[in-house]
Amino acid sequence: MKTGQTSHQLGHAGHMISAAKIHHQKIISGSVDSTIRVWDTITGQCLMILRGHEGEINCVQHDDNFILSGSEDTTIRVSFNYY
């Protein structure tokens, strides 16, 4: 594959993605649909959907053990063991 070539298109069921981060071979994305999704960068497969927010996801942050997410519902959520 050449640099800049698209290998996968990832999405949130027709909703705009508002935040995304890359971690090892995973992409963590948050969306206006109030979900956070964990994607495999090699296959493009959605590995996990995290629910709980009641508003658009504004930001995501992560490390090897957890994901932090902030939402327009004025909450911050912590999701553990997502790998």
Image: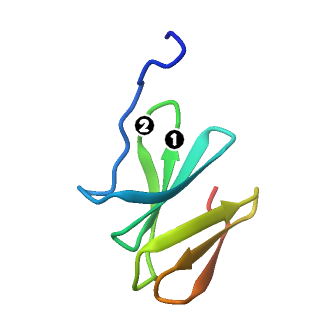
Q: Residues within 10 Å of mark 1 (few under 14, many from 20)?
A: some
Q: Is residue 39 above or below residue 77?
A: above
- Considering the numbered disc 2 on the image, is that residue within a helix, a strand or a loop? loop
> Residue visible at 45% across and 82% down?
53
In the picture, the disc for residue 7 is none
Q: Is residue 73 left or right of residue 69?
A: left
| Residue type (three-letter) at the residue carrying disc 2 | Gly
Q: Position of residue 79 (x, y in %)?
A: 62, 73
Q: Residue at x 39, y 74 (%)?
A: 34
Quarter of the rendering occupied by the C terminus: bottom right
Q: Residue 82: x and y, percent?
A: 62, 62
Q: CA distance from mark 1 to mark 2?
A: 5 Å
Q: Nearer the viewer, residue 69 or 72?
A: 72
Q: Do labels 1 and 2 touch, CB within 8 Å? A: yes
Which quadrant holds residue 33?
bottom left
Q: Residues within 10 Å of mark 2 (few under 14, many from 20)?
A: some
Q: Which residue lies under the disc numbered 1?
A: 40
In the figure, residue 10 lies in which quadrant?
A: top left
In percent of width and height, residue 60 lies at 60, 65
Residue position marked by numbered label 2 in the rendering: 44
Q: Residue furthest top?
A: 2
For numbered disc 1, what is the local secondary structure?
strand
Q: How many marks?
A: 2
In the image as oriented, which residue stretches furthest toward the bottom? 74
Q: Is residue 48 above or below residue 80?
A: above
**On the picture, is 22 further left or further right than 50?**
right
Amino acid type at mark 1: Asp
